[in-house]
Image (cartoon, helix red, strand yellow):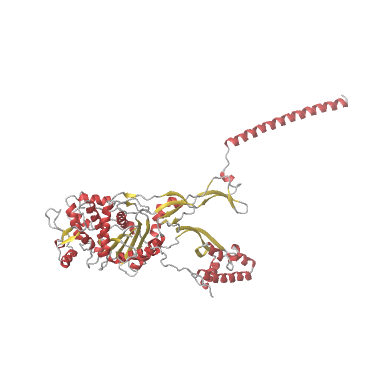
Amino acid sequence: MTKKDSEIKDTIVGRDRIHVVMFFLSFAFMVLGIVILVWIVKIQATYTVDERVINLFRPAVEKHVDTPVRGRILATDGRPLAISAPLYDIYMDCTVLKQKYQEEGKDSLERVWQGKARELATYLSNEFRDKSAEQYAKAILEGRQKGSKYLRIQRNVDLSTLNRVKTFPLFKDGRYTSGFISVEHAERIYPYDSLARRVIGYVKDQGRIGLEASFDSELHGTEGYEWRRVTDNKRWIRDLDSASVKVKDGNDIRTTLNIDFQDIADKALRKQINENEDIRAGICIIMEAKTGAIRAMVNLSRGDTPQTTLWERDNLVLTQTGEQGSVMKTVTLLSVVEDGYVTSLEQTLPTNHGFVPKLGIKGRPSAYPHDAHISDYEREAGRKEITVMHGFEISSNYVFATLAETYYGRQPQEFLDHVYSYRLGEAFDFDINGLRPPYIPRPELEGSWSATTLGTMAYGYAMSVTPLHVATFYNGIANKGKMMKPYLVESVEKDGKVLKKFEPSALNASICSPATADTVTRALRAVVNSGTGTRLKSAKLPVVGKTGTAQVVLSAQERKGSIDPYHDPMGRKKNQGTFVGFFPADDPKYTILVTVYSYLSGRSFYGGTMPALAVKDIVDRIYALDPQWRPELRPTAAVPDMKSHETE
């Protein structure tokens, strides 16, 4: 074989070998490609990455909750009674830069820092006036020595104060030099302090009361949230791959309260109670006659001992059920007049020496207590009869027990039907939770009824109701027989737009005829003009109403073994005195009730004294406040024409 043929053969063999290698390589790469493709499909279809692994490659994500701004509670004229505002707590990291100065041996810089801290202490003392400069300086320097990273400087400061504090020595050098820390939080603020605080109420961990609780769903708003992730420079930004919900601030509640009336009533009650340590509490309700809107509701009380300060501790207007005394004689008078049993207030009854006759008791001797008022009247007037009007003026228990026994003794349910129609037997709906149900005895209830129950109810005992029930009843008389439902909230609003409006509504469209209401109003006028309420005769606006004094049933602990439910062994008792009525008498606009409650005492407190004086003070101040009550000033003198005179 020649050399040339050998070279050609080698070339062909080498080429075939390359083809084989390339074939197998191509086949191998094709198989590998198929495997990779299958693996990719598998990954896409079924593979999930271990969260422990993926978290190593992506930024941390946290849920950030946005708290809504709680809605405002407003007076009827829009003035805020409760608002939420941002407040700030100021703290200080006393250890800032300390370690750096020590490591670098910069004692001079440490002394400069401490000098600025002492200067800061002077500014803090002048600003907050709760500690001396020495005390502030000691707290800061001891905190630096002990390693305190969160020394509290001051709590609940507003934004303007916070910005001012930031300009103080050391603090103005910035957080990383001074250790200044501020923490923002929302705080409920009451611009009028304690006024109407039991009506406004609160929502806290330890309790929920007042409008804050009843309308919490409207006031609270809706929380928002978003997921945030941290950036490389440690800043938090929204994670756009996660869902978010926008925060929705709470709605505002506009109340019926007139804050000026509230202030007037609060001051008038305090004036009567403050200097009398025997008085435990006092309340006042002012209600608009035609609508039932509550314009003022005051609940002042002391603690268990007379030395404690008067404060809005309990909502006594809604919770203080009890026998109301002579103010309930109006219930009896309204009933007998409406039923036609008494056709004239000058109608007479025999005085009977103040003992209720056996009427309706079927031959049993009268068990009613003797009425000394009637004995005095017999002796002074020399008469054996008394008119219904005069019995009302002097608040005679005898007269009203006799009326009840005479006309309802055989059918007490007829009288009870009136009581329930006046809504005195139920806890009707009210804008604040907690209105206690009354107690009304009924003949069919075992142990509830006795031979004297009807007559006792007629002059204000045996049945137990709240002050709000009493005020609502009298408001029905002021409104010519139409009993309006008392209410405290007139609208729910958002940014000034009314979302929900609460209109006045009636509890009973007619508790009596207008003529009956006028007759009873005439009797109420006589109480003020010549009866037990004469302290109101000189009020700037004519007031009509009824006084009432009641003894309060004592607890077993207070009775200390006494069998008398109203007295302890020393003869001491608890009194409540009430005046309730309306004004101006000829065209009633407001119904007013004032009650004072005593501690256990040997003294008596009457509705015609402190309560009546408080009502007079309130009426006089409302008169001075509102120009509608004062007559319009008109010119009455003629001004002569002025003529010019030329001199000669």
Q: Position of residue 288 (x, y in %)?
A: 36, 56
Q: Is residue 14 above or below residue 106?
A: above
Q: Is residue 257 visible?
A: yes
Q: What residue occupies the far left of the structure in this picture?
A: 363
Residue 263 location, x and y as percent? 40, 63
Extreme front residue here? 648
Q: As rendered, which of 285 and 598 lies closer to the eye?
A: 285
- Nearer to us in this view, 446 or 115: 446
Residue 499 percent coordinates (x, y): 45, 49
Q: Is residue 638 left or right of residue 534?
A: right
Tell me which corner region of the image, top left, top right, bottom left or bottom right, holds residue 199. Answer: bottom left
Q: x%, y% of residue 615?
A: 33, 64
Q: Is residue 645 left or right of residue 441?
A: right
Viewport quadrant of the C terminus? bottom right
Q: Quadrant of residue 163?
A: bottom right
Residue with the most extreme top position? 1
Q: Quadrant of the N terminus?
A: top right
Residue 324 visible in the current orientation = no
Does 32 sit above or below residue 67? above
- Total labels: the figure holds 0
Front-most of 96 and 351?
351
